[in-house]
Image: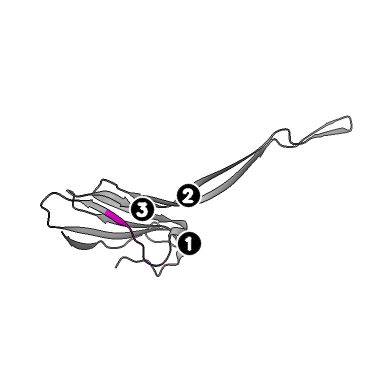
Amino acid sequence: MLTFRKLPKKSIEELIFQVELPKNSLALELAPLQFGTDISEKQKTNTPEVTVGYRGAEVKVGEIFAREVSFNYIKPTISAFGLKEHRFSWSLRDESIRYGSHKFVAVIGVPIGTSDIKIGLSTAIKTTRELFIAGDVATTEEKLMDVKF
């Protein structure tokens, strides 16, 4: 069984689904390759307020220079690794870590004449500091699956 469902979600920093094919096979395509959420941010920079005094008189110089920069970017929450390799995986972070089923697709290339292959499946988690498991990483045993063509 490939599950960590009994762990509290807030204790999981990263959830990884791993696949291992025979060395003569490879992942021709992985979906999703990357998925993310849109993030909007604003940053403001300005010079500090300066007060200058001389013989009891004070002069305050306020903002001489200020600039506000707005930008959008996509924060990856699902990333695929291992395209064109025999070992590949999907990494989930942040809001992509949720209970329930996940669907990932891999198009596999095998040598001509191959009638079946064994695929190894496993999952791993990286935990937050709240939950200590073997150096903050835990992995399930590999589950072997026979796939016939």
Residue 109 percent across, percent down from the top left: 20, 50
Q: Which residue is mark 1?
A: 130
Q: Say which amino acid is labelled 2.
A: Lys
Q: Which badge, 2 or 1, comes first in the chain's sequence?
A: 2
Can I make out residue 10 in this image? yes
Q: Residue at x 24, y 54 (%)?
A: 20
Considering only order in the chain, which callout, 3 or 1, is on the residue closer to the N terminus? 3
Mark 3 neighbour class, 10 Å CA radius: few under 14, some 14 to 19, many 20 or more: some
2 or 1: mark nearer the eye: 2
| Span shown in magenta | 99-106
In this rendering, is residue 12 above or below 66?
below
Residue under numbered circle 3: 32
* Residue type at the position of mark 1: Glu
**Left or right, residue 39 beside residue 36:** right
The dot on residue 120 is none
Residue tagged by mark 2? 75
**What's the colour scheme?**
one colour
Q: Main secondary structure of the magenta part?
A: loop
Pick the front one: 94 or 109: 109
